[in-house]
Image: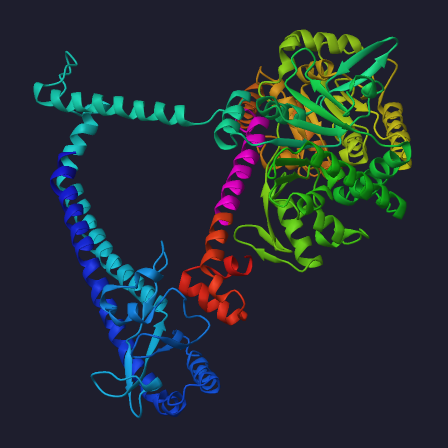
């Protein structure tokens, strides 16, 4: 510290003083140099056009003024000459070009000193205007019979020059000078470090020996005490350790731990007073009739877990499809109901569909068209014109609901998933100032695959109505950007992942979704040992049987058949596991009205039966298939009982089952086998990553997991749990809110800048684009700012 104070700090002060002292001097000299250059240019201009102007100005008429103006316009084609005007000796402005400001008078210009800066009437904020010299034209008779002491003066030519090039060159000079001083500083610093390390080598070695206590002659081998000579050093070392520990604690305290409280704080700090509206097909609470009573159900959903704290904090509105059997019975005349029951903090605005609309919009276009298209799971997408018409109609209905709930002109609207791809563009047309964030919860395919959709342009245009378009992974973001690049006329900024389309800009960002930490219902689940006993009894398994678990919707994208083939291949390659390993597959029925799902259900049951017939017995089944709905508590019980969780998705956005399994294993045991095609594989690297299409590889992963030692299981699971804990669902929502707040600040600032630019560009409002560009340079406004005014 003394070395720093005595040498490096004074050196920094001296270098800074030199830099700050020389910069104004260099800037002043550069400015005078450029002004002299403009003086020479001005004289050349005057000499070039003087002979043409003299005959014109001798006669004061409309025709001569037009001829004079024509000459001046030709002269202003010079890239550094912005405007010209002619004044009489009596300070009367007779001719000027279009860019010449109305606020500048002939009298004001007469006393202008170009070395002292711009005229006050043309200086505003960051805008700087420079002028050339004022030259007299002395020849012939006086204009309008006016005379001056110096003779017959036809007029004075006033020239306004663009000095933006001077600022650029001045900045280059400053940068060069700062670079020189920086180089000198680095050189001195390197020499200082070399000298310091060389001179302090012996001291550092002594301190190291003191700390380690090895080969040090300063430590008494009998008593272990340190000589008095080293007592001050030891004291300093202890103080340094305390400082480092305090610094580490400060860093840990500063590290944000995302939870509902943090999420509310972000909302209050970043979006204070703003209105937040969530739009999704799924609703957070469903009212169903059970006999004469009405039950309220809260579906297990990471989406609900993440977004509900936001709406509670701001008393927002959640717009969703009312699909419960008693949903209509509990809403008011505006189709709204306050939730949560008994602790009402926000509203659900329910949107109603007819059976035909639901069939076309949800089951048809969304789940027979977009779902297989985006998942690329080798199931042919089905596109029907009637389904698309219903999709457009329902998206328009959701848009009308948002407009009915929006109380301000710029709300924050969070649009969720592939069911509502058209809502952002429809909203943008009605609420141009809104901040719209769309999140696509499923994968986005490559451009070739997406190109088979008959309404691909409409889908892309709909999403580009968003301020931000979010996906689970950067890979999906890249696919979306490539699709836009291929099918729409747009401008893409690859560095920032920004897309400019039809006057708007959309950012494309990855937001990997997750689960709450810790899971709320985990406290209701028994211990791991008790869960194993319960699951073993329920499925007629012995206490020594290894248990594998798979929990999915009965969907062809989840790789359930590939999972069964891996179990079959394991029993073929490793017969020792016959009778010692059973795989429990919990498959919740899904979209059973769609033909592809009906056929898949039949195929799954058939293959499971074939494997059981081949390897099973009266007392043993290698595959236990349960096609039924399970509540979250039962699902968590199976997670805690399992030795292996196998997630074999053929193509998935994220897959929260993998993260739920990790969150349930607070005993730090169990092995996760994860498909490389699930978005979660980008985060959960400590899992066993497999290609589910490769049955041999998946079988070997099963064998490796079954034989894995408890020590390796704990090491992997601790790493997995740390990832899921840090990157939880509140972080997902918080990052989106922070980005939405950033976009709102940028848009509001841009709005102010455009208003300021419009006020200062009134004088060139009706000129051609080239003249407008010149005016923008004069006022320091970018091209984008000009053309958006």
Quadrant including the N terminus: top left
Please report the residue visible at 35 percent of the width from the left and 25 percent of the height from the top: 250
Q: Quadrant of residue 183?
A: bottom left
- Looking at the magenta stretch, what is its main secondary structure? helix
Q: Is 748 covered by the magenta stretch?
A: yes
Please report the residue visible at 66 percent of the width from the left and 26 percent of the height from the top: 302
* Image: 476 above or below 278: below
Q: Nearer the viewer, residue 612 or 742?
A: 742
Q: Quadrant of residue 408?
A: top right
**One can see residue 703 in this view:** no
Q: Nearer the viewer, residue 131 or 181?
A: 131
* Image: 662 above or below 453: above
Q: Is 437 covered by the magenta stretch?
A: no
The boundaries of the magenta stretch are: 724-750
Residue 98: % across, % down: 46, 72
Residue 430: % across, % down: 68, 44
Q: Quadrant of residue 317?
A: top right
Q: Nearer the viewer, residue 343 or 76?
A: 76
**One can see residue 66 in this view:** yes
* Image: 116 above or below 467: below
Quadrant including the C terminus: bottom right
Q: Give left or right: position of 48 versus 414.
A: left
Residue 158: % across, % down: 33, 76
Residue 537: % across, % down: 77, 7
Q: Give left or right: position of 488 versus 71.
A: right
- Give the farthest residue toward the front: 145
Colouring: rainbow
Q: Give left or right: position of 25 versus 374.
A: left
């Amino acid at each position: 510290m003394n070395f720093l104070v005595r040498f490096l700090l004074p050196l920094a002060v001296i270098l800074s003083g030199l830099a700050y002292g020389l910069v104004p001097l260099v800037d002043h000299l550069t400015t005078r140099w450029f002004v002299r250059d403009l003086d020479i240019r001005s004289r050349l201009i005057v000499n070039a056009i003087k002979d043409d102007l003299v005959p014109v100005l001798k006669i004061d008429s409309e025709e001569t003024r037009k001829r004079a103006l024509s000459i001046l316009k030709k002269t202003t084609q010079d890239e550094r000459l912005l405007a010209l005007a002619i004044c009489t000796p009596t300070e009367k402005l007779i001719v000027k070009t279009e860019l010449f400001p109305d606020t500048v008078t002939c009298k004001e210009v007469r006393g202008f000193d170009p070395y002292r800066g711009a005229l006050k009437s043309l200086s505003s904020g960051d805008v700087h205007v420079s002028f050339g010299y004022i030259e007299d034209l002395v020849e012939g008779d006086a204009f309008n019979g006016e005379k001056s002491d110096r003779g017959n003066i036809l007029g004075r030519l006033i020239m306004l020059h663009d000095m933006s090039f001077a600022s650029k060159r001045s900045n280059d000079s400053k940068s060069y000078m700062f670079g020189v001083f920086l180089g000198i500083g680095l050189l001195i610093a390197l020499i200082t470090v070399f000298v310091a390390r060389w001179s302090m080598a012996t001291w550092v070695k002594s301190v190291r020996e003191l700390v380690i206590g090895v080969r040090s002659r300063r430590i008494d081998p009998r008593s272990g005490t340190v000589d008095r000579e080293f007592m001050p050093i030891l004291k300093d070392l202890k103080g340094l350790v305390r400082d480092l520990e305090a610094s580490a604690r400060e860093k840990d305290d500063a590290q944000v731990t995302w939870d509902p409280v943090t999420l509310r704080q972000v909302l209050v700090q970043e979006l204070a007073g703003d209105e937040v509206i969530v739009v999704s097909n799924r609703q957070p609470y469903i009212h169903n009739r059970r006999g004469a009573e009405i039950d309220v159900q809260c579906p297990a959903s990471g989406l609900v877990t993440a977004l509900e704290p936001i709406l509670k904090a701001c008393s927002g509105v959640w717009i969703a499809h009312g699909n419960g059997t008693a949903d209509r019975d509990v809403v008011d005349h505006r189709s709204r109901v306050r939730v949560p029951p008994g602790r009402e903090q926000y509203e659900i605005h329910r949107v109603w569909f007819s059976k035909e609309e639901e069939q076309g919009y949800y089951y048809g276009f969304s789940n027979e068209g977009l779902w297989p298209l985006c998942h690329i799971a080798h199931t042919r997408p089905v596109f029907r014109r009637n389904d698309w018409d219903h999709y457009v109609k329902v998206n328009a209905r959701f848009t009308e609901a948002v407009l009915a709930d929006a109380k301000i002109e710029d709300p924050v609207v969070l649009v969720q998933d592939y069911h509502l791809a058209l809502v952002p563009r429809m909203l943008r047309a009605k609420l141009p100032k809104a901040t719209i964030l769309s999140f696509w919860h499923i994968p986005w395919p490559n451009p070739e695959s997406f190109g088979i959709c008959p309404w691909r342009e409409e889908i892309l245009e709909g999403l580009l109505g968003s301020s931000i378009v979010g996906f689970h992974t950067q890979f999906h973001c890249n696919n979306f950007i490539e699709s836009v690049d291929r099918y729409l006329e747009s401008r893409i900024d690859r560095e920032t992942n920004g897309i400019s389309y039809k006057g708007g800009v959309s950012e494309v960002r990855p937001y990997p979704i997750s689960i709450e930490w810790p899971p709320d219902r985990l406290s209701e689940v028994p211990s791991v040992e008790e869960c194993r006993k319960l699951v073993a009894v329920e499925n007629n398994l012995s206490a020594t049987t290894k248990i594998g678990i798979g929990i999915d919707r009965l969907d062809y994208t989840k790789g359930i058949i590939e999972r069964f083939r891996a179990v079959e291949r394991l029993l073929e390659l490793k017969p020792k596991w016959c009778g010692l390993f059973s795989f429990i597959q919990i498959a919740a029925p899904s979209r059973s009205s769609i033909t592809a799902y009906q056929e898949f259900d039949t195929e799954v049951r058939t293959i499971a039966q074939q494997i059981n017939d081949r390897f099973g017995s009266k007392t043993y089944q290698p595959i236990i298939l349960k096609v039924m709905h399970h509540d979250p508590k039962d699902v968590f019980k199976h997670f805690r009982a399992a030795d292996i969780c196998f997630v074999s998705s053929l193509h998935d956005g994220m897959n929260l089952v993998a993260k739920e399994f990790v969150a349930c294993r607070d005993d730090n045991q169990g092995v996760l086998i994860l498909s490389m095609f699930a978005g979660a594989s980008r985060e959960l690297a400590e899992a066993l990553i497999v290609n589910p299409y490769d049955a041999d590889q998946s079988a070997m992963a099963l064998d490796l997991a079954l034989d894995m030692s408890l020590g390796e299981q704990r090491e992997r699971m601790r790493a997995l749990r740390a990832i899921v804990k840090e990157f939880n669902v509140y972080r997902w929502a918080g990052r989106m809110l922070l980005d939405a707040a950033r976009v709102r600040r940028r848009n509001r600032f841009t709005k102010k800048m455009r208003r300021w630019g419009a006020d200062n560009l009134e004088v060139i409002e009706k000129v051609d684009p080239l003249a407008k560009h010149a005016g923008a340079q004069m006022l320091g406004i970018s091209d984008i700012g000009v053309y958006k005014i």
